[in-house]
Image: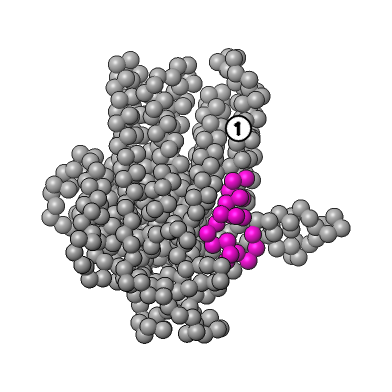
Amino acid sequence: MTMAVECEGTENDIFEYQQYQPSHKPASNRPIVVVNHSSIHPPFGVVITTVLYCAEFVSAAVLCSMYHKTDDQFWLGLTITFMLVPSVLTQLTLTFVHRDLGRDRPLVLLLHLLQMGPILRCVEALMVYFQAGREEEPYVTISRKIRLSMGGGTPTEWEVSHSERKLAAHRNAFKRTAVIQAFLGSTPQLTLQLYATIQEKYMPYTRVVLMGITLVSITYGALVCSVLAIQIKYDDYKVRLRPAAYLCMVLWRGLEIATRVAALVLCSTALTYWVAPAVLGNLAFFLLLPWAEFWTRKASLPENLEKDLSKVGTTVVLCLVTLLYACINIFCWSAVELDLAHRDLIEKRQRWGRLAAYYSVRLAENIVLVVLWYFFRSDYYEHVCAPMLVLQLIVCYALAVLFMLLFYQYCHPCRRLFGRNVEDCLRCVCCRPDGAAQPHAEVSLTLTPQVPPPPDLTSQLGLDRETDILDDITDAA
């Protein structure tokens, strides 16, 4: 999974090149490195997403068969729901991204109706990859990025061929499906099966397999969210993530999601009717937060979000995006914040205060949930050391926060662009001179990256606008 994101990341997402204002220092003194062709990397992410989709769908179907034989209608209905709803959303996403509704492709639409769309798209992506390079292709666009190095940034441009552009569309679609599958399907499925295991007091191997696959799917989806956040916020730079960075993110996301799900499920077994309001409250808060900010700014709906969408269609899409955003934040930090007035729908300015507030509140909430479970637990946990389990869950979530801090301090690919890092923030909080509390106005706890304006590449080449394509984020330095 790490190798898939490492070799692919968000390398071929197609964005429009945004011209920045020229810096105070003229950019003409900085040479541009020209590369004839960018290397085409295998679509590992497409394959991994397809494998996880098929594995989860098949294992859920086998588990449904077991529920049918044992006449467990309640678990059967919920398992089928959490299996089919994300599958249908995945088919709709792939169809929407590839614009198949306006094309004469009846076989493709039939396979999507049969819930086999990801398999077809994966085969298409592999065919494009293996056929690429056999014949010389004219480039269709130019990719421009700034390579970060110890000596500064070097503007670089690559020629992008037809094959790379086709693979970009497939990668772009499968990133969306990976996140949708993870947080609208795998997360509720994992929560349901863990709850069923505790309630029924036995653990069949089919359920164990399904829970393992869903946990991997959720971790992978969260990893994609983190990488996308970095690429979107630093879309003018060629970002490279080292293996250590991916390892740190996997530990961060895995521990965060596992402890969150465990806390919710444990508390729900003891106080079933109290957990539901907490989850719904979280969902409502994160669902309404982007819209509240949108209305506070008195902004208007973004134009050109999709050329074929009306205002009603744009509103529906924005509602679905905020629903996905809310579902992600219930279980883990989404790594991005929505800006419904912006064309990209993403707030590119990192709000570190909001990140700190999220993890502080989430840690406190998890502690409350496991403490409530400890006092109201059932007799099923007689042979479990309850205090040790509570301590383990709290420590695991604290370790997740620790790995997050380590990532931003040492492994973030653009940490050189930060005006202040995590160490500076902690020093401001913990090491105030003379032990006296300084006024709030004198202590800056923001870690806003001080991103220098990139050179105006378009002015150097005499071009007004170019299509930009994001290259591999983890090439070896």
Residue 109 shows in the view: yes
Q: Quadrant of the N terminus?
A: top left
At horizontal 37% and vertical 75% (from top left) the residue drawn is 34
For disc 1, the marked residue is 393
Q: Nearer the viewer, residue 319 or 182?
A: 182
Residue 220 occupies which quadrant of the picture? Answer: top left
At horizontal 46% and vertical 46% (from top left) the residue drawn is 222
Q: Nearer the viewer, residue 168 or 465?
A: 168
Residue span colored magenta: 402-421
29 above or below 176? Answer: below
Task: Inspect the magenta stretch and tell me whether residue 347 lies in it.
Answer: no
Residue 305 occupies which quadrant of the picture? Answer: bottom left
Task: Inspect the magenta stretch and tell me whether residue 412 lies in it.
Answer: yes
Few, some or many residues within 10 Å of mark 1 (<14, 14–19, 20+): many
Q: Position of residue 207 (x, y in %)?
A: 39, 24
Residue 305 shows in the view: no
Badge count: 1
377 above or below 101? Answer: above
Residue 388 occupies which quadrant of the picture? Answer: top right
Judging from the image, what secondary structure is the residue with disc 1 in?
helix
Magenta region, main secondary structure: helix
213 above or below 305? Answer: above
Q: Position of residue 149 (x, y in %)?
A: 52, 67
At horizontal 37% and vertical 42% (from top left) the residue drawn is 181
**Residue furthest to the right:** 434
Is 231 placed left or right of 361 in the picture?
Answer: left
| Residue type at numbered disc 1 | Leu
Question: Which color scheme does this rendered protein use?
Answer: one colour
Q: Position of residue 359 (x, y in %)?
A: 60, 46
